[in-house]
Image (tube, rainbow, N blue to C red):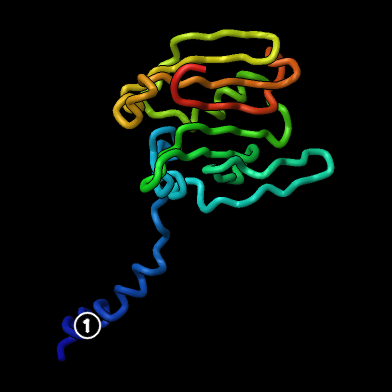
Amino acid sequence: MTKRNMATLTLLVLLPALVACAPKAQAPPCCATLGFNRIQVESVLGSPSPPQPSKYHALPSPPPGASIYTTEHGYLTVTYFGMTPAVAQHLSMDFYEGKDPATGFSIAAAYLPADAKDVAHAVGVKYQIRLFTSAQLARTLPTSGGKIFVECAGPNPSRECDTMEIGAGNP
């Protein structure tokens, strides 16, 4: 055998091992949003993991049809509707510690469809709400009308968000 044939043979033998060791490409963050199915969401967030309760912040069990994912900023509860494939229709982020509204809304923006457009704002006693529209969501969840609400909740939502709610449709 020539050196070239030997090198080719060696490369063919080692190729499957090299491919198996290569880092896996993670799905784009846009797939962890409303209207995407559970497999797409978990390709970004990983498998659900139950929250670690503490004496200061005890978290309840997830509601039926929901899974809790641990993120950098807190626990993200995704509520899925439908059978196969179950589709994400509501997300709730419980922050480890309160965030100012601008930071809370910027963190929540990572879980919005790529084409989401901010169309309205409202500040109340218990909530601060922003309304978005998305043509992509209108295609995947027609009942939403392409509307998404993002809600900052806390004791004083004009200063601090303890939770962020992201839902399809009107609030």
Q: Position of residue 137 (x, y in %)?
A: 36, 27
Q: Is residue 8 above or below residue 89?
A: below
Total numbered circles = 1
Q: Position of residue 66 (x, y in %)?
A: 54, 42
Residue shown at 71% from the left, 20% from the top:
160
Question: Quadrant of residue 163 in the image?
Answer: top right
Q: Nearer the viewer, residue 63 or 155?
A: 63
Residue shown at 39% from the left, 63% from the top:
22
- Tell me the amino acid under the disc marked 1: Leu
Judging by the rendered image, the residue that carries numbered circle 1 is 9
Residue shown at 60% from the left, 52% from the top:
49
Q: Nearer the viewer, residue 115 or 169?
A: 169
Quarter of the picture holding the N terminus: bottom left
Q: Position of residue 107 (x, y in %)?
A: 56, 29
Q: Position of residue 45 (x, y in %)?
A: 50, 46
Q: Is residue 11 above or below residue 124?
A: below
Q: Residues within 10 Å of mark 1 (few under 14, many from 20)?
A: few
In the image, 93: left or right of 134? Answer: right
In the image, 142: left or right of 163? Answer: left
